[in-house]
Amino acid sequence: MQFQTGQFVMINHLNSLEQREYSVYSGEQDDYLEILVREVIDGNVSPKLKKLKEGSFLELDGPFGFFKFDPMDFDSKKFLFVATGTGISPFHSFVRTYPDMEYKLIHGVRLGEEAYEHEDFDKKKVMLCTSGESKGHFNGRVTDYLVSQNIETDTNCFLCGNSEMIHEVFDILTAKKVPVSNIYSEVYF
């Protein structure tokens, strides 16, 4: 399946009306399609995905979305990725596709065990913020961390995760004089 990093697919079980969008987690050159799923106990799709056996079939539609990414499309090659939870998915795809680019990833989770394969990122370029324990690099929310950081105004900032974080980070970045034209977001919840 052809896709561009940052796009998402719609997934549902065969003959089911319940579907959910998932950002593509794999890189463009990978010979497989990978998504990152966090089980939501009362969810309509994720609990069923957890019960799938190897060889099971799903319906997939897409790819969709405008969160597409190619570092060559930007005048400035400075990139900041801010994610909460599974919002790390498109950034994983970005880095798998463009492993030599310059970036900083700020990933917020409640517990360190929710860090989702940080080993696939350059460890010098990742800041893990944990709000529920002190196992990360920073104890607190991504917004708490960002407030204390200097961010160059020509940085291209990509935000993915819960809507509250995105609104707060948008306000923090614009207060730091990052132009709105340099802020891109993908909201799923």
Image (spheres, rainbow, N blue to C red):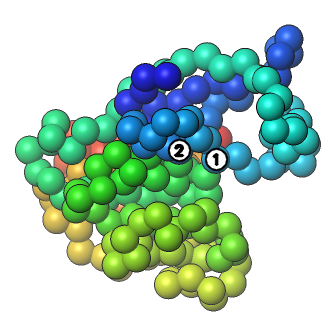
Is residue 165 shown to the viewer in this render?
A: no
Residue closer to the observer: 94 or 108: 94
Rounded to the nearest whole Å, what is the CA distance between mark 1 and mark 2? 6 Å
Residue closer to the observer: 189 or 89: 89
Residue at the limit of the structure toward the left, as seen here: 75
| 10 Å crowding of disc 1: few (<14), some (14-19), many (20+) | some
Who's the residue at 53% across and 30% down the image?
A: 8
Do tag 1 and tag 2 residues touch (Cβ < 8 Å)? yes
Q: Report whether 145 appears left or right of 49.
A: left
Residue closer to the observer: 155 or 148: 155
**Mark 1 sits on what residue?**
36
- Vertical side of 170 occupied by 112: above or below: below
Who's the residue at 54% across and 36% down the image?
A: 32
- Vertical side of 160 occupied by 133: above or below: below
Name the element at disc 1. Answer: loop
Who's the residue at 69% across and 84% down the image?
A: 133
Is residue 105 shown to the viewer in this render?
A: yes
**Amino acid on which the number 2 mark rests in the picture:** Tyr
**Amino acid on which the number 1 mark rests in the picture:** Leu
Name the element at disc 2. Answer: loop
**Which disc is residue 25 wearing?**
2
- Residue 37: where, in percent of width, then height? 70, 46
Give the mark, 1 or 2, whose residue is nearer the N terminus: 2
- Vertical side of 87 occupied by 61: above or below: above
- Residue 161: where, in percent of width, then height? 55, 49
Q: Which image quarter is the C terminus in?
A: top right
Who's the residue at 61% across and 41% down the image?
A: 35
Question: Tag count in the figure?
Answer: 2
Q: Report whether 173 appears left or right of 168.
A: left
- Residue 95: where, in percent of width, then height? 36, 53
Res 117 → quadrant: bottom right
